[in-house]
Amino acid sequence: MPATHSAAILVGNGLSIAFNAELNLQTITEEVMRRIEDAAGDDVVAAMKEIAERALPDGVTSAEDFEQLVGAFGAESRTLSTLETLASLTSPTDRKLRRAIRRVASFAEQVRDNGVSHVLEVICERSRAYHDDAADLHALVSAVLDRFDGRVVFGNLNYDTLLLAALMHVCRSGDLADMADGRTRVTVTVNDEEEREVPALRALRILGGVRRSGVA
């Protein structure tokens, strides 16, 4: 039986940025800040940035990275949850204190969720892959699949769905098991002993059984 050649391709945001420069991290961050400013005012943006900068390590800035900006409020919420635990231990009868901490933690989560919603909105708007514009991306996927006669697996680290859209277009004669669907679950072993049930990864199969490509 002749040897087959398989490949695992890890795809990052560089692919999306090559497709559309407006998916650059700094560009997305600037647009998110503009939308938050339009909705809530520049004082709110300034306060968010100040809080984020205090939560970040020295030398790290949120000015060009929405992950750092939005993530800082998630970190604040987790810190406050720990503070609530501390309050329960040191002042077990002070329910008013614990309620106040929970309220502030909830506010931090709301700020984070609001920021995330703006981020997702911008990414969605800039990830439209019309046929003529996506020709180069389709050609790239076709070239990879044609090069290997074994199993081809794509690991996708992008925020958008451009790679998935290209795979669906190029491999449209195949079946698609959607990882986001959630109906298919598998059992995995963690730390060589603990079994957990998790959603199955997305699998894209080219009919005929000669080649199979998966997207994780």
Image (cartoon, helix red, strand yellow):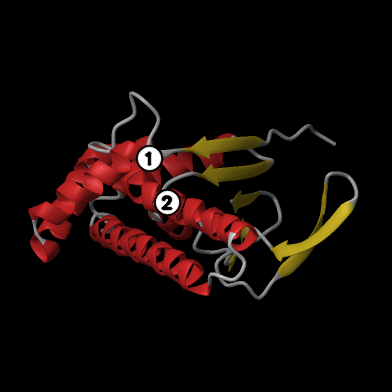
Question: Left or right: 121 with respect to 180?
Answer: left
Which quadrant of the figure has residue 192?
top right
Contact check, label 2 and label 1, Cβ < 8 Å: yes
Q: Residue at x 61, y 57 (%)?
A: 90
- How far, Cα to Cα, is label 2 from label 1? 8 Å
Question: Left or right: 183 with respect to 59?
Answer: right
Q: Position of residue 161 (x, y in %)?
A: 40, 56
Q: Which mark is residue 39?
A: none
Residue 64 visible: yes
Q: Which residue is mark 2?
A: 76
Name the residue nearer the viewer: 37 or 1: 37
**First reached walking from the N terminus: tag 2 or tag 1:** 1
For mark 2, give the secondary structure: helix
- Amino acid of disc 2: Glu
For mark 1, give the secondary structure: helix
Q: Which residue is mark 1?
A: 55
Name the residue nearer the viewer: 37 or 182: 37
- Amino acid of disc 1: Ala
Name the residue nearer the viewer: 19 or 169: 19
Q: Position of residue 1 (x, y in %)?
A: 85, 36
